[in-house]
Amino acid sequence: MGNEENPKQSDPFVVVLDAGHGGKDPGNLGNGYREKDIALNVVLKIGEELEKYPNIKVLYTRKTDVFVDLFERGKIANKAKADLFVSVHCNSHRSQAYGTETFVLGIHRNETNFEVAKKENAVIFMENDYESKYEGFNPNSPESAISIILGQEEYLDQSIMLASLIQENFTNKLHRNNRKVKQAGLIVLHQTVMPSVLVELGFLTNNAEGRYLNSTKGQNEMSDAITDAILKYKKAIDSNVEDLTLIGTHMEDDTEEDVLTVVNPDIEFKVQIAASSRDLITKPYNFKGLEGVTKTSENGLYKYYYGLTSDYNVIKTLEEEAKNKGYKTCFVVAFKKGEKIPLSEALKSTAN
């Protein structure tokens, strides 16, 4: 495995930037602002910064005010064998809702996420021959949305990693309202076979946020935050585990509340401390002195775990220990008969 890494290092890191909407599809027009223009301005600024790095290649699904099918956007990324796909949009709502959120492909956790997916997916009705391209997909059907999730699971961890870094920058650097990382059945993400995120920069329908996103200052700040997150993601994937930033606490979840009796021999908990393209020997000197680190390999990404127990209280103690050692963004994962399962599902099994 080690020898295979060298040729990869000379390959450029390919990022496909996707400005939502365009041409005959203006996107949302909250407060009279045009989503398609704001998304394009932000995407062009991100690309301009990333292009300064000789080892990064940037491609765009559109660089002008044109209409591009969702199907075509994914095709551009797949043909380029892209390492990342980042789609940029702006939100709208009947209320004065505000804040940023970043979506990865997944089953809707709630009705709100489904509404966002419905809105973003509805553009397919503007495309010619959409029935055959999307095989009868109906944006208004939750069942259709769930059906598009299958097949993208393998990239979910990396997608969440990037989405978390983006949200972290929006929240900590720009002090935007954090609506967190969310999962939804978005066709534009479903069409891609690589880590992919859809960023909602904020709500054009909110008076203050709309003004901010329509301003040069707002667009510069938001594009800088996304650029920085992409560079951090690349460094994390390329780097030694010592420097790795992992998924933070921004994932919208319904997990670990009020769990008391939590032992089930069928369920195993581990603490994921890192993920990297580097294959490291699992000795304490590589992991800040932590003993008993194990690893798995999935799609060229090595995941490193600390601890193994069926007792949730024990794993929470080990998670705290890992955080004290410097793995600030480590998190608990659950397995059932060797297969990874959602933590919420594991906790229901242990609490019953």
Image (cartoon, helix red, strand yellow):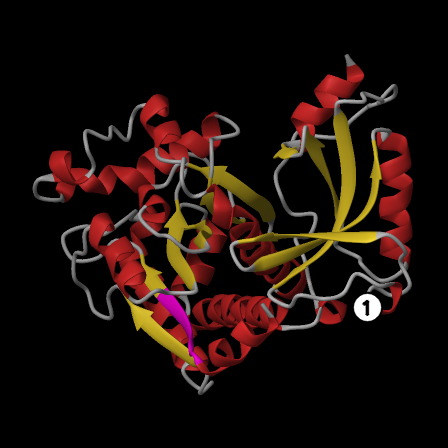
Q: Position of residue 310 (x, y in %)?
A: 83, 29
Nearest the eye: 295 or 99: 295
| Quadrant of res 341 | top right
Residue drawn at point x = 19 percent, y = 33 percent: 135
From the image, give the main secondary structure of the stretch colored magenta: strand
Does 14 lie within the magenta span? yes
Nearest the eye: 201 or 195: 195
| Quadrant of res 216 | bottom left
Nearest the eye: 352 or 221: 352
Give the extent of the magenta segment. 11-16
In this rendering, the answer to whether 309 lies above or below 272 is above
Q: Is residue 33 visible?
A: no
Residue drawn at point x = 35 percent, y = 22 percent: 143
Q: Position of residue 130 (x, y in %)?
A: 14, 39
Q: Position of residue 188 (x, y in %)?
A: 32, 48
Which residue is the site of mark 1?
286
Sort mark 1 into few (<14), some (14-19) or many (20+) by Cα contacts within 10 Å.
Answer: some
Residue drawn at point x = 42 percent, y = 78 percent: 12
Q: Three-letter amino acid code at disc 1? A: Asn
In this rendering, the answer to whether 66 lies above or below 109 is below
| The furthest residue to the left | 128
Query: The C terminus is located in which quarter?
Result: top right
| Quadrant of res 62 | bottom left
Does 254 lie within the magenta span? no
Q: Position of residue 219 (x, y in %)?
A: 44, 68
Query: The N terminus is located in which quarter?
Result: bottom right
Q: Is residue 276 visible?
A: yes
Horizontal arrangement in the rendering, residue 258 relative to residue 314 (left or right): left
**Callout 1 secondary element:** helix
